[in-house]
C-alpha cells in the first residue's frame, strides 16, 4: 500500500480486504492563488482535483 492510504493508515478502518489503490489517486496538490489572496486579504490555496491520474474529480 502506498500514497494517501499508507500515510493515513493509522486513522482509517483498513482491513486485509481493503483494495490497494494503484493509480496514485488522491494527494492532489495545493497551489497558492496570489491574485485571489490579494483581492480577499487572506491566504487562498486551491486544491487541484483535476490532477488526479484518472482525470476525474468531484465538485
Image: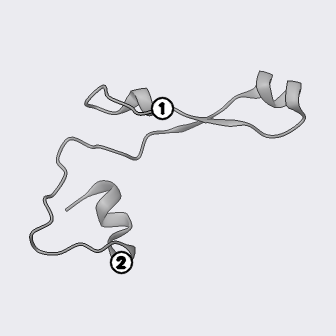
Name the front one of labels 2 and 1.
1
Q: Give the image location of residue 4, x and y in percent.
A: 34, 56
Residue sitting at 37 percent across and 65 percent down?
7
Furthest residue in direction left, as rendered: 17
The residue where tag 2 is placed is: 10
Residue sitting at 32 percent across and 71 percent down?
9
Tag 1's secondary structure? Answer: loop
In-image side of 39 versus 26 (left or right):
right
Place residue 39 in its image quadrant: top right
In-image side of 11 versus 46 (left or right):
left
The CA span between labels 2 and 1 is 27 Å
* 10 in relation to 48, above or below: below
- For label 1, count other residues whose C-alpha is less than 10 Å away and answer few (under 14), some (14-19) or many (20+): few
Q: Give the image location of residue 11, x and y in percent.
A: 39, 75
Q: Which quarter of the rendering shows the N terminus?
A: bottom left
* 27 in relation to 12, above or below: above
Amino acid at each position: 500500500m502506498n500514497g494517501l492510504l499508507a500515510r493515513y493508515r493509522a486513522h482509517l478502518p483498513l482491513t486485509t480486504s481493503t483494495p490497494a489503490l494503484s493509480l496514485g489517486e488522491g494527494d492532489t496538490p495545493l497551489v497558492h492563488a496570489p491574485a485571489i489572496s490579494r483581492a480577499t486579504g487572506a491566504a487562498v490555496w486551491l486544491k487541484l482535483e483535476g490532477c488526479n491520474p484518472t482525470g476525474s474529480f468531484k465538485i
